[in-house]
Image (tube, rainbow, N blue to C red):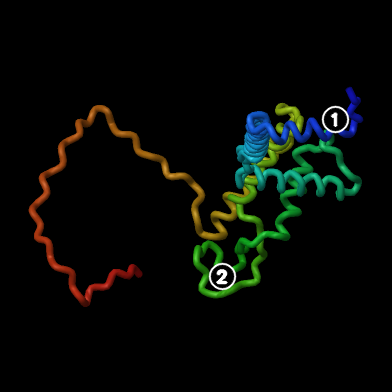
Amino acid sequence: MATIPPSFKSSSNTENTSMNPITNSTAGKNNSNSDMNLITSITLSSASSSSPTSPPSTPSRYENQKRRDWNTFGQYLRNHKPPLSLSRCSGAHVLEFLRYLDQFGKTKVHTQLCPFFGLPNPPAPCPCPLRQAWGSLDALIGRLRAAFEENGGNPEANPFGARAVRLYLREVRDSQAKARGISYEKKKRKRPDPHVQEQPPPAAAPTTTLPPSNNATTSNH
């Protein structure tokens, strides 16, 4: 019996494989299943990698302002002559910082010699200086006081809570209230007297609904 060369064996096997429809069908199904499994795995991995993640929480407006204020105060300490470290900062340095900020103020504070002293709405401009409003300074100190402790400062040695700072803010509040003719006092809510019995409101008298007038105006002066 003649020996078939390897090349012919290979070709013969190939021919037999190609000539057997059952073998081709089974191989085709296996390849198709493999392709489907591969596509499915790629789709799942792609979907898992592209799944939306929860966005990071954005800082609030208060937190952003507090960070800017803290950076501004740190720059002030670095530019101080001589430069100051945070551990050596005291209430006196905080007062210097507040007075330094007055040059950037936008609130007109009338002097006692100004004819508009005590007027809330001056009728004309005047050469009185611009200062930081008391409300702005009070809010600034509150943010810096919180930032000091958040950055490792000792709450008991917080320079922004020093007594001198509180007295200065109170003085600014009172002087600006007189100069601008406004009041910063909070209105106290009247507590109901428990001994006085509340009487039911009187019955409302019947009213007549009138049609709207064409000449009626709704603007408030």
| Residue 168 is at least partly visible in this image | no
Label 2: how many Cα within 10 Å (few below 14, some 14–19, many 20+): few
Residue 150 place in picture, x, y as percent: 71, 33
| Residue denoted by label 2 | 115
Residue 219 placement: quadrant: bottom left
Lateral position of residue 173 relative to residue 71, left or right: left
Mark 2 residue type: Pro
- Which label belongs to residue 120? none
Viewer-nearest of discs 1 and 2: 1
Q: CA distance from mark 1 to mark 2?
A: 118 Å
Horizontal and vertical percent for residue 64? 66, 46
Does the image show residue 77? yes
Q: Nearer the viewer, residue 158 or 64?
A: 64
| Quadrant in which the N terminus appears | top right
Q: Residue furthest bottom?
A: 215
Q: Kindly give the residue lying farthest to the front in the view shown.
A: 1
Crowding near pointer 1: few (<14 within 10 Å), some, many (20+)? few
Task: Look at 54% across and 60% down and name the residue there.
Answer: 180
- Quarter holding the C terminus is bottom left
Q: Please report the residue visible at 10 percent of the width from the left and 57 percent of the height from the top.
A: 207
Residue at image coords 81%, 38%: 89
Residue at point 55%, 56% (across, down): 178
Kindly identify which numbered label has been placed on residue 9.
Answer: 1
**Where is residue 105 drawn, in percent x and y?**
67, 59
Looking at the picture, tell me which residue is in the foreground, 74 or 32: 32
**Image quadrant assignment for residue 128:** bottom right
